[in-house]
Image (spheres, grey):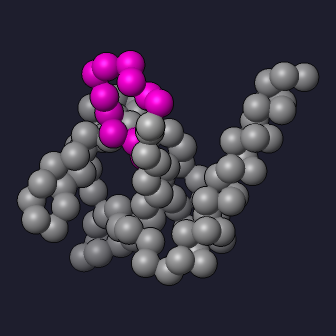
Amino acid sequence: MSDQFGDDIITITDEDGVEYVLEVLSVLEVDGNEYYALVPAEDDDSQEDLEVTILKVTEENGEEILCAIEDEQELEHVYQVMMDELYRDDDTEEE
């Protein structure tokens, strides 16, 4: 699936052989499936226009891989659960 650099940085390689270094923002289980929320791992502090990518963990040939979510409804559902979890964590920290 990926090479692990640390607790929150991974590299993935797409089907064209292009490698991406990504930071894991969150790992969440939704409806029995595992999903990763990822952003590009940047060395600078420009986090203004951060694009979050949500990938699904699937198994292929006995190996776990990260895949794009093809089903728009599934993607929206997972995104909403992640946002709810994020805001619930924020609310808990403020109390």
Q: Quadrant of residue 39?
A: top left
Number of marks present in the image shown = 0
In this image, 9 relative to 25: left or right? left
**Principal secondary structure, stretch drawn in magenta:** loop
Residue drawn at (16%, 49%), measured in percent from left and top?
A: 19
From this view, report whether residue 61 is shown above or below residue 80: below
From this view, report whether residue 69 is shown above or below residue 87: below
Task: Name the spot of residue 74 as percent of width and height, x first.
Answer: 58, 75
In this image, 34 relative to 2: left or right? right
What quarter of the picture does the N terminus occupy? bottom left
In this image, 58 relative to 14: left or right? right
Task: Name the spot of residue 57 as percent of width and height, x first.
Answer: 42, 64
Residue 3 appears in view: yes
Task: Name the spot of residue 4 as percent of width and height, x first.
Answer: 28, 38
Magenta-drawn segment: 38-48
From this view, report whether residue 1 is shown above or below residue 20: below
Which residue is outermost to the front?
49
From this view, report whether residue 19 is shown above or below residue 8: below
Residue 64 appears in view: no
Q: Is residue 19 magenta?
A: no
Closest to the observer, 28 or 25: 25
Residue drawn at (44%, 39%), measured in percent from left and top?
A: 50
What quarter of the picture does the C terminus occupy? top right
Which residue is outermost to the right?
95
Q: Is residue 43 magenta?
A: yes
Closest to the observer, 35 or 80: 80
Residue drawn at (84%, 22%), measured in percent from left and top?
A: 94
Residue drawn at (80%, 24%), measured in percent from left and top?
A: 93
